[in-house]
Amino acid sequence: MIHQLDIDSFRGFSALSIRELGQVNLLVGRNNCGKTSVLEAIHMLVATGDPSSIWHIATRRGEYVSSERQPKARGPEIDISQLFHGHELRPDSRFVIADDSERKVEATIESAEEPSPSPEPYFSGEEWVDAEEEFEGPAEFRLTWSRQGEGEVWWEAPLTPRGGIHRGRTTTHWDELRGKWSGDHDWQPVRVITTAGLTPREVTVLFEDVVLTPDEQKAVEAIQTIDPGIERIAPKSSESGRGGMFAKRAGIDRPVPIGTMGEGIWRMLGLALALAKSAGGVLLVDEIDTGLHYTVMDKMWTLVTETARRLNVQVFATSHSRDCFDSLAIVSPSAAEQGIDVSVQRLEQGASEAVSFTKDEISMAAERAVEVR
Protein backbone atom coordinates (compact mmCIF):
# COMPACT_ATOMS: atom_id res chain seq x y z
CA MET A 1 0.00 0.00 0.00
CA ILE A 2 1.33 3.44 -0.95
CA HIS A 3 0.92 5.89 1.95
CA GLN A 4 3.30 8.56 0.66
CA LEU A 5 4.44 9.39 -2.86
CA ASP A 6 7.41 11.59 -3.78
CA ILE A 7 8.02 12.80 -7.32
CA ASP A 8 11.14 14.64 -8.46
CA SER A 9 11.56 16.23 -11.91
CA PHE A 10 8.84 14.16 -13.60
CA ARG A 11 6.75 15.88 -16.27
CA GLY A 12 5.45 19.20 -14.89
CA PHE A 13 6.67 18.57 -11.35
CA SER A 14 10.01 19.89 -10.18
CA ALA A 15 9.07 18.28 -6.87
CA LEU A 16 5.84 16.95 -5.36
CA SER A 17 5.04 15.07 -2.16
CA ILE A 18 1.65 13.48 -1.45
CA ARG A 19 1.05 12.26 2.10
CA GLU A 20 -1.68 10.47 4.05
CA LEU A 21 -2.81 8.39 1.10
CA GLY A 22 -5.48 5.82 1.81
CA GLN A 23 -6.91 2.75 0.13
CA VAL A 24 -9.24 4.89 -2.02
CA ASN A 25 -7.86 8.25 -3.15
CA LEU A 26 -9.39 11.06 -5.19
CA LEU A 27 -7.05 13.59 -6.83
CA VAL A 28 -8.61 16.99 -7.52
CA GLY A 29 -7.36 20.31 -8.82
CA ARG A 30 -7.57 22.70 -11.74
CA ASN A 31 -6.72 21.79 -15.30
CA ASN A 32 -3.03 21.26 -15.96
CA CYS A 33 -2.13 20.84 -12.28
CA GLY A 34 -0.73 17.35 -12.89
CA LYS A 35 -3.43 14.90 -11.80
CA THR A 36 -2.90 12.58 -14.76
CA SER A 37 0.87 12.85 -14.32
CA VAL A 38 0.52 11.55 -10.74
CA LEU A 39 -1.38 8.52 -12.05
CA GLU A 40 1.40 7.94 -14.59
CA ALA A 41 4.06 8.18 -11.89
CA ILE A 42 2.24 5.59 -9.80
CA HIS A 43 1.88 3.38 -12.88
CA MET A 44 5.63 3.39 -13.46
CA LEU A 45 6.39 2.77 -9.78
CA VAL A 46 3.97 -0.14 -9.29
CA ALA A 47 4.86 -1.64 -12.67
CA THR A 48 8.39 -2.04 -11.22
CA GLY A 49 10.12 -0.69 -14.27
CA ASP A 50 8.15 -2.59 -16.92
CA PRO A 51 9.29 -0.67 -20.03
CA SER A 52 5.97 -1.20 -21.78
CA SER A 53 4.42 1.14 -19.18
CA ILE A 54 6.54 3.93 -20.65
CA TRP A 55 5.21 3.20 -24.13
CA HIS A 56 1.59 3.18 -22.92
CA ILE A 57 2.03 6.40 -20.94
CA ALA A 58 3.52 8.25 -23.91
CA THR A 59 1.14 6.93 -26.56
CA ARG A 60 -1.97 7.79 -24.52
CA ARG A 61 -0.90 11.42 -24.83
CA GLY A 62 0.22 11.14 -28.44
CA GLU A 63 3.82 11.91 -27.51
CA TYR A 64 5.61 10.75 -30.63
CA VAL A 65 8.66 12.15 -32.33
CA SER A 66 7.23 14.27 -35.14
CA SER A 67 6.65 12.13 -38.22
CA GLU A 68 8.90 14.13 -40.52
CA ARG A 69 11.88 13.27 -38.30
CA GLN A 70 11.19 9.53 -38.12
CA PRO A 71 12.68 6.90 -40.40
CA LYS A 72 9.85 5.30 -42.30
CA ALA A 73 11.29 1.80 -42.00
CA ARG A 74 11.34 1.63 -38.19
CA GLY A 75 7.85 2.81 -37.26
CA PRO A 76 6.83 5.29 -34.56
CA GLU A 77 9.08 6.59 -31.82
CA ILE A 78 7.92 7.97 -28.50
CA ASP A 79 9.28 11.36 -27.48
CA ILE A 80 11.03 10.47 -24.24
CA SER A 81 11.83 14.11 -23.44
CA GLN A 82 8.21 14.69 -22.37
CA LEU A 83 8.75 12.56 -19.25
CA PHE A 84 11.44 14.88 -17.89
CA HIS A 85 10.78 18.20 -16.17
CA GLY A 86 11.54 20.95 -18.67
CA HIS A 87 11.14 18.49 -21.57
CA GLU A 88 14.82 18.61 -22.45
CA LEU A 89 17.22 15.73 -23.03
CA ARG A 90 20.62 16.42 -21.53
CA PRO A 91 23.29 14.08 -20.19
CA ASP A 92 22.18 15.04 -16.66
CA SER A 93 18.41 14.71 -17.22
CA ARG A 94 16.83 12.66 -14.43
CA PHE A 95 13.53 11.95 -12.71
CA VAL A 96 12.75 9.94 -9.57
CA ILE A 97 9.49 8.45 -8.28
CA ALA A 98 9.45 6.85 -4.80
CA ASP A 99 7.07 5.72 -2.07
CA ASP A 100 7.25 5.05 1.66
CA SER A 101 7.99 1.32 1.20
CA GLU A 102 11.38 2.23 -0.30
CA ARG A 103 10.35 1.43 -3.84
CA LYS A 104 11.97 3.78 -6.31
CA VAL A 105 12.10 4.28 -10.04
CA GLU A 106 14.87 6.47 -11.38
CA ALA A 107 15.33 7.38 -15.03
CA THR A 108 18.44 9.06 -16.38
CA ILE A 109 19.94 10.09 -19.66
CA GLU A 110 23.47 8.80 -20.07
CA SER A 111 25.84 10.61 -22.42
CA ALA A 112 27.73 8.76 -25.11
CA GLU A 113 31.48 8.30 -24.82
CA GLU A 114 31.65 9.35 -28.44
CA PRO A 115 29.09 10.57 -31.00
CA SER A 116 26.73 7.79 -32.05
CA PRO A 117 26.17 7.17 -35.76
CA SER A 118 22.62 7.01 -36.97
CA PRO A 119 21.59 3.32 -37.25
CA GLU A 120 19.94 3.95 -40.60
CA PRO A 121 18.93 6.83 -42.86
CA TYR A 122 16.45 9.22 -41.32
CA PHE A 123 14.44 12.20 -42.53
CA SER A 124 15.76 15.53 -41.27
CA GLY A 125 12.61 17.44 -42.13
CA GLU A 126 13.90 18.43 -45.54
CA GLU A 127 15.85 15.44 -46.79
CA TRP A 128 16.94 11.87 -45.97
CA VAL A 129 20.26 11.76 -44.12
CA ASP A 130 22.58 8.77 -44.57
CA ALA A 131 23.95 6.61 -41.75
CA GLU A 132 27.25 8.45 -41.59
CA GLU A 133 25.57 11.50 -40.06
CA GLU A 134 26.35 11.60 -36.33
CA PHE A 135 24.13 12.57 -33.43
CA GLU A 136 25.99 14.69 -30.89
CA GLY A 137 23.37 14.41 -28.14
CA PRO A 138 22.68 11.84 -25.39
CA ALA A 139 22.77 8.23 -26.47
CA GLU A 140 20.88 6.21 -23.90
CA PHE A 141 17.79 6.24 -21.69
CA ARG A 142 18.38 4.25 -18.52
CA LEU A 143 15.74 3.09 -16.06
CA THR A 144 16.75 1.94 -12.58
CA TRP A 145 14.29 0.21 -10.28
CA SER A 146 15.13 -0.41 -6.65
CA ARG A 147 13.64 -1.51 -3.38
CA GLN A 148 15.04 -0.98 0.11
CA GLY A 149 18.14 0.67 -1.27
CA GLU A 150 19.15 -2.22 -3.51
CA GLY A 151 19.17 -0.68 -6.96
CA GLU A 152 20.17 -2.03 -10.32
CA VAL A 153 19.82 -1.00 -13.93
CA TRP A 154 16.54 -2.60 -14.81
CA TRP A 155 16.20 -1.56 -18.41
CA GLU A 156 18.05 0.64 -20.85
CA ALA A 157 17.48 1.64 -24.44
CA PRO A 158 19.50 3.67 -26.92
CA LEU A 159 17.94 6.90 -28.08
CA THR A 160 17.52 7.39 -31.79
CA PRO A 161 19.21 10.32 -33.55
CA ARG A 162 15.92 12.14 -33.07
CA GLY A 163 15.88 11.62 -29.29
CA GLY A 164 13.13 9.00 -29.36
CA ILE A 165 12.70 5.34 -28.43
CA HIS A 166 11.26 2.76 -30.81
CA ARG A 167 8.34 0.63 -29.71
CA GLY A 168 10.35 -2.57 -30.07
CA ARG A 169 12.70 -1.35 -27.35
CA THR A 170 9.82 -1.09 -24.85
CA THR A 171 8.33 -4.54 -25.49
CA THR A 172 11.26 -6.63 -24.32
CA HIS A 173 10.00 -9.94 -22.97
CA TRP A 174 8.82 -9.20 -19.42
CA ASP A 175 9.86 -12.60 -18.04
CA GLU A 176 13.44 -11.88 -19.05
CA LEU A 177 13.38 -8.59 -17.17
CA ARG A 178 11.90 -10.19 -14.08
CA GLY A 179 14.63 -12.79 -14.21
CA LYS A 180 17.18 -10.01 -13.70
CA TRP A 181 15.80 -9.34 -10.24
CA SER A 182 17.50 -11.70 -7.80
CA GLY A 183 15.61 -10.80 -4.61
CA ASP A 184 12.17 -11.84 -3.44
CA HIS A 185 9.43 -9.54 -4.62
CA ASP A 186 5.65 -9.45 -4.56
CA TRP A 187 4.61 -8.39 -8.05
CA GLN A 188 1.52 -6.20 -7.91
CA PRO A 189 -0.94 -5.94 -10.78
CA VAL A 190 -1.60 -2.39 -11.97
CA ARG A 191 -4.48 -1.50 -14.26
CA VAL A 192 -5.36 1.81 -15.91
CA ILE A 193 -8.68 3.25 -17.06
CA THR A 194 -8.11 6.40 -19.14
CA THR A 195 -10.58 9.20 -19.78
CA ALA A 196 -11.63 7.27 -22.89
CA GLY A 197 -12.44 4.20 -20.79
CA LEU A 198 -11.51 0.63 -21.57
CA THR A 199 -11.49 -0.54 -25.16
CA PRO A 200 -14.16 -3.02 -26.28
CA ARG A 201 -11.47 -5.68 -26.53
CA GLU A 202 -10.29 -5.01 -22.96
CA VAL A 203 -13.84 -5.20 -21.60
CA THR A 204 -14.52 -8.47 -23.42
CA VAL A 205 -11.29 -10.08 -22.20
CA LEU A 206 -11.86 -8.93 -18.61
CA PHE A 207 -15.43 -10.19 -18.63
CA GLU A 208 -14.42 -13.59 -19.97
CA ASP A 209 -11.98 -13.83 -17.05
CA VAL A 210 -14.74 -13.34 -14.44
CA VAL A 211 -17.44 -15.51 -16.01
CA LEU A 212 -18.81 -18.08 -13.52
CA THR A 213 -17.16 -16.31 -10.59
CA PRO A 214 -18.73 -14.04 -7.94
CA ASP A 215 -17.28 -11.06 -9.80
CA GLU A 216 -19.54 -11.74 -12.77
CA GLN A 217 -22.56 -10.95 -10.60
CA LYS A 218 -20.78 -7.89 -9.19
CA ALA A 219 -20.34 -6.58 -12.74
CA VAL A 220 -24.03 -7.08 -13.46
CA GLU A 221 -24.98 -5.37 -10.21
CA ALA A 222 -22.76 -2.41 -11.13
CA ILE A 223 -24.63 -1.67 -14.35
CA GLN A 224 -27.98 -2.40 -12.71
CA THR A 225 -27.41 0.77 -10.65
CA ILE A 226 -27.97 2.64 -13.91
CA ASP A 227 -30.46 0.30 -15.60
CA PRO A 228 -32.25 -2.03 -13.14
CA GLY A 229 -33.88 -3.83 -16.08
CA ILE A 230 -30.64 -5.54 -17.06
CA GLU A 231 -30.64 -9.20 -16.01
CA ARG A 232 -27.49 -10.66 -17.60
CA ILE A 233 -24.58 -9.64 -19.80
CA ALA A 234 -22.46 -11.70 -22.17
CA PRO A 235 -19.99 -11.26 -25.03
CA LYS A 236 -20.70 -12.41 -28.55
CA SER A 237 -17.41 -13.31 -30.18
CA SER A 238 -18.72 -12.86 -33.71
CA GLU A 239 -19.28 -9.16 -33.08
CA SER A 240 -16.70 -6.41 -32.74
CA GLY A 241 -16.57 -3.09 -30.90
CA ARG A 242 -19.05 -2.26 -28.15
CA GLY A 243 -21.59 -4.31 -30.09
CA GLY A 244 -19.61 -7.36 -28.95
CA MET A 245 -21.10 -7.11 -25.42
CA PHE A 246 -24.82 -7.79 -25.04
CA ALA A 247 -27.33 -7.45 -22.24
CA LYS A 248 -30.50 -9.39 -21.50
CA ARG A 249 -33.18 -6.94 -20.35
CA ALA A 250 -36.38 -7.85 -18.54
CA GLY A 251 -39.31 -8.21 -20.91
CA ILE A 252 -37.16 -8.21 -24.06
CA ASP A 253 -36.32 -11.54 -25.67
CA ARG A 254 -33.65 -10.27 -28.04
CA PRO A 255 -30.21 -9.40 -26.54
CA VAL A 256 -29.43 -5.69 -26.65
CA PRO A 257 -25.92 -4.37 -27.49
CA ILE A 258 -24.52 -2.62 -24.42
CA GLY A 259 -23.05 0.04 -26.69
CA THR A 260 -26.58 1.33 -27.39
CA MET A 261 -27.31 1.93 -23.71
CA GLY A 262 -25.12 4.96 -23.10
CA GLU A 263 -21.68 5.85 -21.81
CA GLY A 264 -22.56 5.44 -18.13
CA ILE A 265 -23.31 1.72 -18.37
CA TRP A 266 -20.11 1.09 -20.34
CA ARG A 267 -18.09 3.07 -17.79
CA MET A 268 -19.57 1.23 -14.79
CA LEU A 269 -19.04 -2.14 -16.44
CA GLY A 270 -15.40 -1.35 -17.18
CA LEU A 271 -14.85 -0.07 -13.65
CA ALA A 272 -16.35 -3.20 -12.05
CA LEU A 273 -14.30 -5.52 -14.24
CA ALA A 274 -11.06 -3.58 -13.77
CA LEU A 275 -11.53 -3.66 -9.99
CA ALA A 276 -12.10 -7.42 -10.11
CA LYS A 277 -8.87 -7.97 -12.04
CA SER A 278 -6.77 -5.65 -9.84
CA ALA A 279 -6.91 -7.86 -6.74
CA GLY A 280 -3.90 -7.24 -4.51
CA GLY A 281 -2.75 -4.40 -6.71
CA VAL A 282 -3.51 -0.88 -7.88
CA LEU A 283 -6.24 0.60 -10.08
CA LEU A 284 -5.72 4.02 -11.70
CA VAL A 285 -8.79 5.81 -13.08
CA ASP A 286 -8.57 9.13 -14.92
CA GLU A 287 -11.79 11.18 -14.63
CA ILE A 288 -13.64 8.44 -12.79
CA ASP A 289 -17.02 10.17 -13.15
CA THR A 290 -16.94 10.33 -16.96
CA GLY A 291 -20.35 9.50 -18.41
CA LEU A 292 -22.01 9.14 -15.00
CA HIS A 293 -25.02 11.16 -13.84
CA TYR A 294 -24.65 12.68 -10.40
CA THR A 295 -27.50 10.51 -9.07
CA VAL A 296 -25.42 7.30 -9.47
CA MET A 297 -22.06 8.59 -8.24
CA ASP A 298 -22.64 7.47 -4.65
CA LYS A 299 -23.37 3.97 -6.00
CA MET A 300 -20.18 4.16 -8.04
CA TRP A 301 -18.15 5.04 -4.94
CA THR A 302 -19.86 2.28 -2.98
CA LEU A 303 -18.81 -0.19 -5.69
CA VAL A 304 -15.24 1.14 -5.56
CA THR A 305 -14.84 1.15 -1.78
CA GLU A 306 -16.50 -2.22 -1.15
CA THR A 307 -14.58 -3.98 -3.93
CA ALA A 308 -11.31 -2.34 -2.87
CA ARG A 309 -11.81 -3.72 0.63
CA ARG A 310 -12.88 -7.17 -0.54
CA LEU A 311 -10.04 -7.64 -3.04
CA ASN A 312 -7.35 -5.49 -1.37
CA VAL A 313 -7.10 -2.98 -4.22
CA GLN A 314 -5.65 0.51 -3.77
CA VAL A 315 -7.50 2.99 -5.99
CA PHE A 316 -6.29 6.33 -7.31
CA ALA A 317 -8.80 8.39 -9.29
CA THR A 318 -9.05 11.93 -10.64
CA SER A 319 -12.04 14.23 -11.12
CA HIS A 320 -13.05 17.86 -11.74
CA SER A 321 -16.60 17.27 -10.52
CA ARG A 322 -18.08 18.71 -7.33
CA ASP A 323 -20.75 16.00 -7.50
CA CYS A 324 -18.03 13.34 -7.56
CA PHE A 325 -16.44 14.82 -4.43
CA ASP A 326 -19.76 15.23 -2.60
CA SER A 327 -20.71 11.62 -3.41
CA LEU A 328 -17.43 10.38 -1.99
CA ALA A 329 -18.14 12.40 1.15
CA ILE A 330 -21.47 10.59 1.51
CA VAL A 331 -19.85 7.17 1.15
CA SER A 332 -16.65 7.74 3.17
CA PRO A 333 -18.17 7.33 6.69
CA SER A 334 -19.54 3.87 5.87
CA ALA A 335 -16.26 3.03 4.14
CA ALA A 336 -14.38 4.01 7.29
CA GLU A 337 -16.60 1.68 9.35
CA GLN A 338 -15.43 -1.15 7.08
CA GLY A 339 -11.79 -0.19 7.67
CA ILE A 340 -11.25 1.61 4.35
CA ASP A 341 -9.15 4.78 4.49
CA VAL A 342 -10.40 7.40 2.03
CA SER A 343 -8.43 10.50 1.13
CA VAL A 344 -8.86 13.50 -1.15
CA GLN A 345 -5.68 15.14 -2.42
CA ARG A 346 -5.76 18.61 -3.96
CA LEU A 347 -2.96 19.46 -6.36
CA GLU A 348 -2.00 23.05 -7.01
CA GLN A 349 0.16 24.08 -9.93
CA GLY A 350 3.67 24.91 -8.72
CA ALA A 351 3.09 23.61 -5.17
CA SER A 352 5.56 21.06 -3.83
CA GLU A 353 3.05 19.31 -1.58
CA ALA A 354 -0.54 18.22 -2.13
CA VAL A 355 -3.23 19.34 0.30
CA SER A 356 -4.58 16.21 1.98
CA PHE A 357 -8.17 15.88 3.26
CA THR A 358 -8.98 13.12 5.73
CA LYS A 359 -12.39 11.43 6.11
CA ASP A 360 -13.63 13.98 8.65
CA GLU A 361 -12.35 16.92 6.61
CA ILE A 362 -14.01 15.52 3.46
CA SER A 363 -17.38 15.33 5.24
CA MET A 364 -16.96 18.79 6.75
CA ALA A 365 -16.03 20.34 3.40
CA ALA A 366 -19.07 18.75 1.75
CA GLU A 367 -21.46 19.88 4.51
CA ARG A 368 -20.18 23.49 4.40
CA ALA A 369 -19.85 23.57 0.60
CA VAL A 370 -16.14 24.36 0.90
CA GLU A 371 -14.44 24.34 -2.49
CA VAL A 372 -11.70 21.72 -2.44
CA ARG A 373 -11.12 21.36 -6.18
Image (cartoon, grey):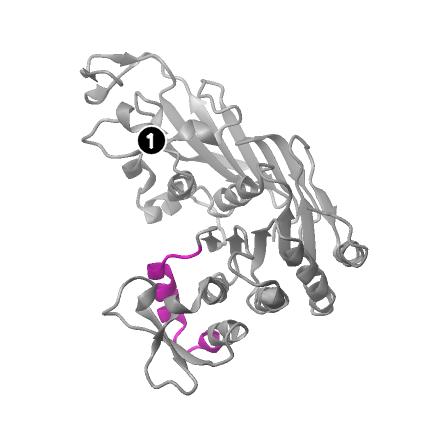
Three-letter code, disc 1: Ile
Local crowd size for mark 1, using a 10 Å CA cut-off: few (<14), some (14–19), many (≥20): many
Quick one: 248 or 193, which is closer to the camera? 248
Determine whether 354 is above or below 200 in the image. Answer: above
Determine whether 229 is above or below 305 in the image. Answer: below
Q: Does the magenta stretch include residue 202?
A: yes
User: Does residue 149 appear left or right of residue 129 in this picture?
Assistant: right
Determine whether 240 is above or below 54 in the image. Answer: below
Quick one: 26 or 9, which is closer to the camera? 26
Q: Is residue 167 visible?
A: yes
Q: Residue at x 67, y 62 (%)?
A: 327
| Span colored in magenta | 197-217
User: Does residue 73 appear left or right of residue 282 in this picture?
Assistant: left
Q: Quadrant of residue 18?
A: top right
- The kind of secondary structure the magenta stretch mainly shows is helix
User: Where in the figure is residue 369, as x and y percent of width and height?
Assistant: 78, 54
User: Where in the figure is residue 273, as x and y percent of width and height?
Assistant: 45, 66
Determine whether 367 is above or below 73 in the image. Answer: below
Q: Does the magenta stretch include residue 190?
A: no
Q: Can residue 305 be seen in this view?
A: no
User: Where in the figure is residue 132, as x and y percent of width and height?
Assistant: 20, 12
Q: Quadrant of residue 82?
A: top left
Q: Which residue is drawn at 28% across and 23% down?
A: 69
- Mark 1 residue element: strand
Q: In which quarter of the image is residue 134?
A: top left
Q: Name the residue under label 1.
A: 165
Quick one: 335 or 176, which is closer to the camera? 335
Q: Which residue is drawn at 46% across and 34% down?
A: 144
Tag count: 1
